[in-house]
Image (tube, helix red, strand yellow):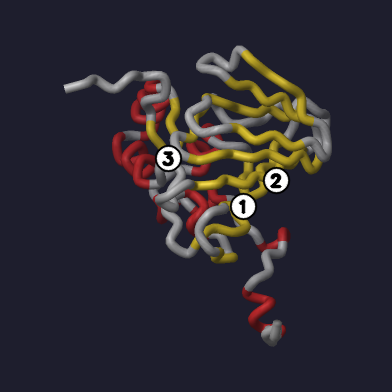
Amino acid sequence: MKTIKVTPEEMGRRTARFKDLVPYSRQHSGGGGVPMEVMEKLTAHRVYSIMAPANYVGRSAMAPIKSVPGAVISIAECPPGDGPGLHCHETTVENFFCLSGRFELQWGDNGEDSMILEPLDFVSVPPGVSRRFVNISEEIGRLFVVIQPSGEQQDRVAYAPVVGTEIESAYGTGVLDNLKELGFKFDAGVESEKA
C-alpha cells in the first residue's frame, strides 16, 4: 500500500490541545442564546468537545477536529459532587472511560440503579436509558466520552418536563427554544400520545 504525506500544518489541524479547548457551555452562551449556568445545570460542569463529524448538529458541532460520521468525542470535567441531571440520549450510545476521579453512574427513570467507575473503567450506555453521573471523589474528575450517533449525525437529549419548566420560568422561552435547537428535549419518561 502506498502511504500519503501529511504536512505539519495538516496534522496541526487534526490536533486538539486541551489548553486551547473551550467548554461548550461557553461556546453556546451569549451568541448561542443559552446562559452558561443553564448549560452547566444540564451537563457536566465543563464539557470539552474534541471531535465531531463535519455534518454534526448539536452541542458538540463546534469541536475543533472534524471527523467522518459515527463518533463525537469529548471530555466531561466535574468538580467533586458535580454531574449532569438525569437525562436520556434518544438515539445514541454514550460511552464513558474514567480518566481521573471516581464517578457514580446512575441509570433508570429515577436513577434507581448505579455503579462506581474508577480510573480506567469503561461503560457503554445504550440509547433510550435515563442516566447521570456524579464525581464522588475529592478531586476534579474527568471522563473521556464517546457518543456514537446512528444514522443522522445528531444527539437528541431528553430531560424530564419539570427541568424545561424550571428553565423557562427562570430564563424565558427563548433560552428553552435555543436549547431545543441544540438537540435538548424536555419529555423524558413521557409517552407520546397516539393519534
SS class, disc 2: strand
Q: Which residue matches tag 2? A: 144
In the rendered image, residue 178, in percent from the top left (x then y), is placed at 35, 44
Residue at left offset 71%, top offset 64%: 17
Q: Could you say where residue 18 lies in the image, as x and y percent from the top left?
A: 72, 59
Task: Mark 3 and mark 2 in contact? Answer it, CB < 8 Å.
Answer: no
Residue nearest the viewer, comparing 183 with 167: 183
Residue 119 percent coordinates (x, y)? 83, 37
Give amino acid for label 3: Arg
> Which residue lies most toward the left here?
195
Along the line of sight, which residue is nearer the eye, 128 or 11?
128
Quarter of the picture containing the N terminus is bottom right
Camera-side residue of 125 and 110: 125
- The mark found on residue 156 in the picture is 3
Q: How many marks?
A: 3
Relative side of 44 to 79, left or right: left
Q: Give the residue pinned by disc 1.
A: 73
Label 2 crowd bin: few (<14), some (14–19), many (20+), radius 10 Å: some
- The amino acid beneath tag 1 is Ile
From the viewer's perspective, tell me whether residue 146 is left or right of residue 38.
right
Q: State the residue at coordinates (41%, 19%).
A: 189
Please tell me whether residue 116 is drawn above or below residue 55 in the rendered image.
Answer: above
